[in-house]
């Protein structure tokens, strides 16, 4: 049975006898002679799927209403003859030049009122009814023509929604925003109350006076800005659903997806709203070299995507074999990193390994972006590495459909992220992901896997619940966190959580309003730390002082008093010396509520997390040397231990079974070579 539950004997199924392996294929960039070479090399590399047509609109409809499908028919047939499944794009991600020339009103407008002209990609306003009509007409043509093609295994709607065209501040968006607000608030009194417009003379008395949060003299209204983010995400989701409905009319049995951008740098869509509408959650990921911990971010991203998929396997639609071309400097991947990166995604729940793109372009904006077939051609280390990875993907078929084991939930909320990024916060150094990424990374260092989930997710069954910087939170979500502690979980809340309600109104009576009772902590005033500033911590053991045994905090501090909580660390210097920095309150039967009022250094926070894990009875997936990542996937058929050795030394661990990467039996111990990986079906 297909993992997507769409088995129809006449139709091509998404390949699930292996971890599906392939990527974006753009044959329109190449003469036909190259296509024959493409399929030969795809066979060598073990490619089992391609994504076709993502940016093909101007090749499918070169002038208005004139269609040229012949070339795509031929490519679809070619894929079918070679047993390669097609993820077929609706081709609506970027309009052809004739469309924007004839209807310049579809072009997006930035916050400063500047039109974003064609010449790149995705130059369309998310609210434009005109653009939508043209896109739906093309989608209809695509679905009519290809719905029963034997190569078709999935529909790929548009591409990376919002990447370049959100937010748009044009007049069409202004009108659509008003309609969205009317649906949300009903009347202007309610909107005025929600936005707090008594402040700075912003009270609205006519809907037509409401505008997008365009360039202003100084800080805009934070709830106005927050609602514009909600509006943008909803608008594009509506567009996606319209395309999906057109597809469904012709093609009821083929799964439909759109590739998310769940990388932490991308913050424009609320994927928690989008995910339930995907037949399978798919996403793209690129390693961002400038991050302090790029591979920890990669792992976080996988756990977040799995959370969006409700724990089910997901598709990695795009990643890269080596360098990208959109960072200030684009380092190539070191030998081994391609395998390690890909298997990290699989470890964290991906059942598909897709790449951008099959053959590296000769021209255009992405000609220096790596691909499966590099400019150097098949006689290259990179292509040999690709073939080796394809062979490994072929051997991983037995674990397709299995689930990742995790005892820890870490809450992630796009709305809270938007709100924290809003105007005039206590500290611009306060970045929503910092606490989440830090805790996640330190747990990963300890072999402990997190499910990164929405605050509304079911928290029952988790032994540890981490609540990082959940600044904006509903009463219901706060109650669910408290209930988890009552039920016996170790709950760890970090600074700047529970501060405001969903309208971004501060919860009064002392911070962190929504979690004050649970934590037994009441904060009177924030003392954010300057960039680079540290505050010494005292753990009661005589340590303290920067570098001392009590460690130090950065980013944040606050003037807290405990009410029924124990002080684990106090501030040892600065204006808050002697006040609580880290606290713990016993809750219910064996549960506890821990609070971090600052961000302790890695060593201090790591020790604290070890206490929390110990109290929760959470064990690592395996005992391994530092720098080796371990994750376990499990199904009714068995368990698979992923061992990802990111270090320059070989790593030995106790495990017995069969290593699917090397194709060898192992046990009672095994050694995983430096900068490589093992996937062990455990005996
Ligand atoms: C995104 C897009 C691709 C390509 C890659 C490059 O993921 O979907 O078309 O531009 O980025 O990294
Ligand atoms: Zn617009």
Image (tube, rainbow, N blue to C red):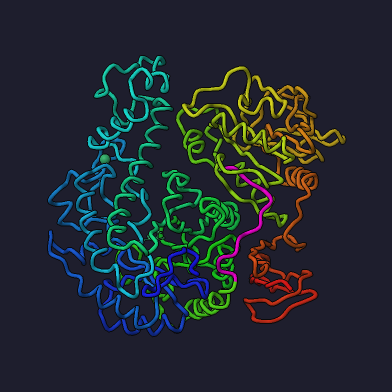
Residue 184: x, y in percent?
A: 37, 29
What is the x, y in percent for residue 289? 52, 57
In-image side of 541 versus 207 (left or right): right
Does residue 441 appear to the left or right of 306 in the view shown?
A: right
Say if 183 sits above or below 62 in the image: above
Residue closest to the eye, 56 or 432: 56
Residue 19 located left or right of residue 196 = right
Going 15% across and 48% down the picture, which residue do you hit?
Answer: 103
Whether residue 143 can be seen here: yes
* Magenta stretch in the rendered image: 399-411
The residue that appears at 75% across and 63% down in the rendered structure is 624
Tell me the residue at 75%/29% (across/down): 571
Residue nearer the viewer, 507 or 485: 485
Estimate the x, y position of residue 645 in percent, counting from the top left: 67, 67
Single out the residue that lies furthest toward the right. Answer: 541
Is 674 positioned to the left or the right of 149 in the image?
right
- The spot of residue 414 in percent (x, y) is 49, 41
Q: Nearer the viewer, residue 617 or 103?
A: 617
Which quadrant of the picture is home to ligand 2?
Answer: top left
Q: Residue at x 56, y 77 (%)?
A: 392
Which image quarter: residue 540? top right
Image quadrant containing the C terminus: bottom right
Can residue 584 be seen? Answer: no
Q: Which quadrant holds residue 111?
A: top left
Looking at the picture, does residue 226 appear above or below residue 650?
Answer: above
């Amino acid at each position: 049975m297909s993992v997507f539950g769409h088995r129809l004997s006449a139709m091509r199924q998404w390949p699930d006898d292996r971890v599906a392996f392939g990527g974006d294929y753009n044959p329109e960039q190449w003469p036909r002679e190259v296509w024959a070479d493409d399929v030969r090399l795809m066979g060598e590399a073990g490619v089992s799927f391609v994504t076709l047509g993502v940016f093909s609109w101007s090749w499918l409809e070169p002038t208005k209403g004139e269609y040229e499908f012949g070339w795509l028919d031929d490519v679809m047939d070619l894929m079918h003859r070679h047993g390669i499944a097609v993820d077929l794009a609706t081709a609506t991600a970027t309009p052809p030049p004739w469309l924007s020339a004839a209807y310049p009103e579809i072009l997006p407008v930035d916050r400063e009122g500047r039109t974003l002209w064609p010449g790149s990609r995705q130059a369309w306003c998310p609210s434009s009814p005109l653009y939508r009509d043209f896109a739906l007409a093309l989608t209809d043509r695509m679905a009519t023509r290809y719905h029963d093609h034997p190569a078709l295994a999935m529909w790929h709607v548009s591409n990376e929604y919002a990447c370049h065209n959100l937010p748009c501040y044009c007049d069409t968006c202004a009108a659509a925003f008003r309609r969205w607000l009317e649906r949300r608030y009903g009347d202007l009194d309610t909107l005025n109350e929600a936005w707090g417009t008594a402040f700075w003379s912003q009270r609205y008395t006519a809907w037509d006076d409401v505008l997008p949060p365009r360039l202003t003299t100084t800080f805009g209204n934070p709830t106005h800005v927050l609602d514009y983010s909600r509006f943008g995400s909803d608008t594009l989701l509506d567009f996606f659903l319209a395309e999906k409905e057109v597809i469904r009319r012709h093609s009821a049995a083929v799964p439909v997806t759109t590739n998310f951008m769940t990388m932490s740098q991308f913050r424009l869509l609320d994927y928690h709203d989008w995910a339930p509408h995907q037949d399978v959650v798919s996403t793209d990921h690129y390693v961002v070299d400038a991050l302090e911990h790029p591979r920890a971010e990669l792992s976080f991203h996988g756990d977040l995507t799995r959370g969006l998929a409700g724990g089910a396997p997901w598709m990695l639609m795009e990643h890269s074999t080596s360098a990208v071309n959109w960072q200030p400097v684009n380092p190539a991947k070191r030998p081994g990193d391609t395998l390690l990166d890909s298997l990290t995604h699989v470890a964290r729940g991906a059942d598909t390994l897709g790449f951008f793109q099959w053959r590296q372009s000769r021209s255009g904006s992405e000609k220096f972006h790596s691909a499966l077939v590099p400019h150097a051609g098949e006689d290259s280390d990179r292509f040999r590495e690709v073939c080796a990875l394809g062979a490994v993907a072929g051997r991983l078929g037995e674990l397709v459909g299995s689930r990742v084991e995790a005892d820890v939930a870490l809450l992630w909320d796009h709305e809270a992220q938007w709100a924290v990024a809003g105007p005039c916060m206590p500290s611009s150094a306060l970045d929503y992901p910092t606490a989440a990424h830090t805790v996640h990374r330190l747990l990963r260092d300890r072999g402990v896997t997190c499910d990164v989930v929405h605050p509304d997710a079911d928290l029952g069954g988790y032994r540890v619940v981490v609540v990082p910087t959940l600044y904006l939170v509903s009463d219901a979500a706060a109650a669910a966190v408290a209930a988890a502690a009552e039920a016996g979980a170790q709950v760890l809340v970090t600074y700047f959580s529970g501060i405001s309600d969903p309208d971004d109104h501060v919860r009064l009576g002392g911070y962190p309003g929504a979690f004050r009772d649970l934590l037994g902590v009441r904060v009177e005033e924030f003392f954010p730390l300057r960039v680079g500033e540290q505050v010494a911590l005292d753990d009661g053991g005589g340590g303290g002082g920067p570098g001392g045994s009590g460690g130090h905090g950065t980013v944040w501090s606050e003037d807290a008093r405990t009410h029924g909580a124990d002080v684990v660390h106090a501030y040892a210097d600065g204006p808050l010396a002697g006040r609580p920095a880290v606290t713990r309150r016993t809750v219910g039967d064996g549960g506890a509520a821990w609070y971090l009022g600052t961000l302790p250094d890695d060593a201090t926070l790591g020790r604290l997390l070890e206490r929390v894990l110990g109290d929760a009875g959470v064990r690592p997936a395996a005992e391994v040397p530092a720098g080796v990542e371990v994750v376990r996937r499990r199904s009714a058929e068995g368990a698979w231990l992923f061992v990802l050795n990111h270090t320059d030394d070989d790593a030995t661990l106790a495990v017995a079974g069969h290593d699917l990467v090397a194709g060898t039996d192992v046990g009672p111990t095994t050694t995983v070579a430096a900068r490589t990986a093992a996937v062990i079906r455990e005996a």
